[in-house]
Amino acid sequence: MKMVFRWFGEKHDSIPIQYVSQIPNVSGVAATLMDKQAGDLWTADEIAALKNSITAAGLEMEVIESVNIHDDIKLGVPSREKYIENYKETIKNLGQAGVRVICYNFMPIFDWMRTDLWKKLDDGSETMSYDHTVMESIGEPNEMIRRFEAGSGGFSLPGWEPERLSMVKELFRKYDGITHDDLMDHLRYFLEQIMPVCEEYNVKMAIHPDDPPWDLFGLPRVLKDRDSMQEILTMVDNPYNGITLCTGSLGVSPDNDIPALIREFGARIPFAHVRNFKRTADKTFWETSHFTPDGSLDMYAIVKALHDCAPDCYIRPDHGRMIWGEKGRPGYGLYDRALGVAYINGLWESMDRQG
């Protein structure tokens, strides 16, 4: 296991990279180029500059999260070819820079969804939450975009790029009629095209589950349960085609047994996002500390499954609460995620010592 910490870069993160290097057992960061739009080519010089800012703090850059997929690839239109070529070149450049895993998603239009970015908990901390009844009452995608912009705290939110979402009506028109099978077929085509480059430059692709794992605004989802994981891994049966196992994204559906999924697919899990949440009703939850009793997931069982079945994967603590008066990008403060690292480290060390 290598522990990493998501970091958005010097211009986009409220957390200095030196603070990340002070968290025990964090070997590197899951990095990104926030200024890049979906479909852009990541040049070798840009990647080198990012890597230099990370290695100067004594950390590694072996995981990238994310190189976003252009909508034309998801839509399967002819113009996807130029964006796939850009993606291939980006994989090459990242691989030559020492990146071993690229986390990405194939969610149409919206990357992830919450109905409240600043839910106040009884202890005074703040967290992100989702209430499907609120979601259904909104109805209009532009209203959800407005809410995210108002609640962002001035930070750019990953997957909610203003330039792209300003065209949301046009995007919905383009996705009209796209089915689950269509989206899965377009994913298959994309993976078939890039796998030779991944093999050549030793870069694993790790698709992130849909968050949350159910349809939104009539848009289909491709990765939401055990069967869809199996379908994605078998339709392009290559060890460089893998899964980012996100305990929160999958776990909010009570039908998903996270430890069982890890034990079944561990060999194809190069990256894991570990977090907890409190499920309060059907399709309703808020995000908690990582500690098992605070949420709805058995974190010991999850870490034990990763320890047994994906021992070489990269792990990062996922979304955290805002605690101790911290203000920052929703879900991505320093303190609660650092506590999550310490908790996961303790579980992992105890398992190592048990033999």
Image (cartoon, grey):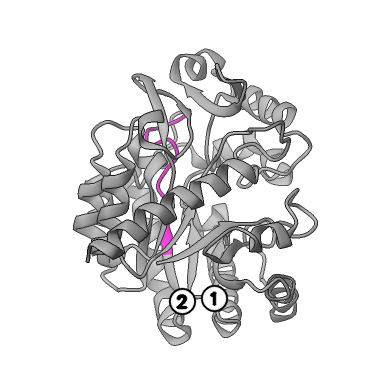
Rendering coords of residue 63 (x, y %): 53, 67
Q: Is residue 310 above or below residue 167?
A: below
Q: Quadrant of residue 109?
A: top right
Q: What amino acid does circle 2 point to?
A: Val
Mark 2 — residue?
Answer: 203
In the foreground, 13 or 106? 13
Residue 74 appears left or right of 140: left
Residue 215 in magenta?
A: yes
Q: Decide: marks 2, 1 in contact (CB < 8 A)?
A: yes
Residue visible at 65% across and 64% down in the picture: 21
Q: Is residue 285 above or below residue 335?
A: above
Residue 296 appears left or right of 194: left
Residue visible at 70% across and 28% down in the picture: 151
Q: Quadrant of residue 125?
A: top right
Rounded to the nearest angstrom, the CA distance separating label 2 from label 1 is: 7 Å
Mark 1 — residue?
Answer: 99
In the foreground, 181 or 90? 90
Question: Which region is colored magenta?
Answer: 206-217
